């Protein structure tokens, strides 16, 4: 199954980090560290990501407990979508008909629409379209303050980050991350935007600490890995 999904998701990777609270008083680095701490303390969050590149548009929505229980849906523009439920060490994966038509040829092609494939979570590989329930909130690169703004209904500050992206330590001169961090209430990271290398990737965070009810599909709708690969 993993081989059938590999190399589909090629969007720019984002590392969640940010800052915010009293943006005119604290340094950019202090804002960044404060936001990282706030996000790492969360028990639940919803993540929505959109990547636009020359090859098309990919969207992903993840609702997670930031540990090992989450639901996700990844959609490739014009090429179908893949739903996922992860509970501990098990993934339940359901492709739609358009996905099967476009990416058939591997074991997942034997799964009919509206059926879920049950597979070990440790078989997921980077690039196969399956999400991890965890999300890293880490500092990196050089950060500078931007201006005050609003994200949805919350006041925020923009922080611009240049990341060192190669082994020589040379900064990525083509790309820039902008982190939008709440300056009212808790300093949540509200949104990140990456622009560079022909990619624009926007990641939004919401539903902070709103519980996520993750349950397996009905057993009648589930095919075990052995049935799918048979």
Image: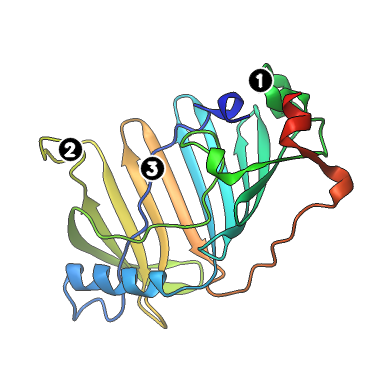
Near-viewer residue (29 or 94): 94
Residue under label 3, please give it: 13
Q: Which residue is at 35% across, 30% downward?
A: 198
Where residue 96 appears, as percent x and y from the top left, is 75, 34
First reached walking from the N terminus: tag 2 or tag 1: 1
Tell me: 156 left or right of 86: left
Question: Element type at marker 3?
Answer: loop
Callout 2: few (<14), some (14-19), or many (20+) C-alpha neighbours within 10 Å? few
Mark 3 surroundings: few (<14), some (14-19) or many (≥20) residues within 10 A: few
**Residue 106: image tag:** 1
Above or below, 108 relative to 44: above
Comparing marks 2 and 1, which lies closer to the viewer? Answer: 1
Residue drawn where x is 64% and y is 49% of the image: 90
Q: CA distance from mark 2 to mark 1?
A: 39 Å
Q: Quadrant of the C terminus?
A: top right
Q: CA distance from mark 3 to mark 2?
A: 17 Å
Can residue 188 be spotted in the picture? no
Q: Which mark lies nearer to you, 3 or 1?
A: 1
């Amino acid at each position: 199954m993993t081989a059938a999904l590999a190399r589909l998701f090629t969007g720019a990777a984002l590392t969640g980090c940010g800052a915010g609270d009293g943006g005119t008083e604290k340094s950019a680095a202090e804002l960044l560290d404060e936001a990282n701490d706030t996000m790492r303390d969360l028990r639940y969050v919803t993540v929505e990501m959109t990547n636009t590149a020359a090859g098309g548009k990919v969207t992903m929505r993840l609702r997670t407990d930031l540990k090992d229980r989450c639901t996700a849906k990844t959609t490739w523009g014009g090429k179908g979508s893949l739903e996922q439920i992860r509970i501990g060490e098990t993934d339940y994966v359901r492709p739609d008909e358009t996905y099967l038509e476009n990416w058939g040829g591997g074991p997942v092609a034997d799964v009919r629409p509206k059926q879920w494939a049950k597979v070990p979570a440790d078989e997921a590989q980077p690039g196969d379209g399956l999400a991890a329930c965890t999300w890293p909130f880490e500092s990196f690169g050089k950060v500078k303050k931007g201006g005050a703004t609003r994200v949805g209904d919350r006041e925020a500050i923009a922080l611009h980050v240049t990341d060192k992206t190669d082994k020589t330590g040379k900064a990525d001169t083509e790309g820039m991350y902008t982190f939008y961090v709440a300056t009212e209430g808790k300093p949540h990271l509200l949104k990140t935007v990456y622009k560079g290398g022909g990619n624009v990737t926007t990641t939004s965070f919401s539903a902070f600490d709103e519980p996520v009810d993750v349950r397996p599909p009905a057993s009648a709708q589930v095919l075990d890995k052995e049935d799918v690969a048979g």
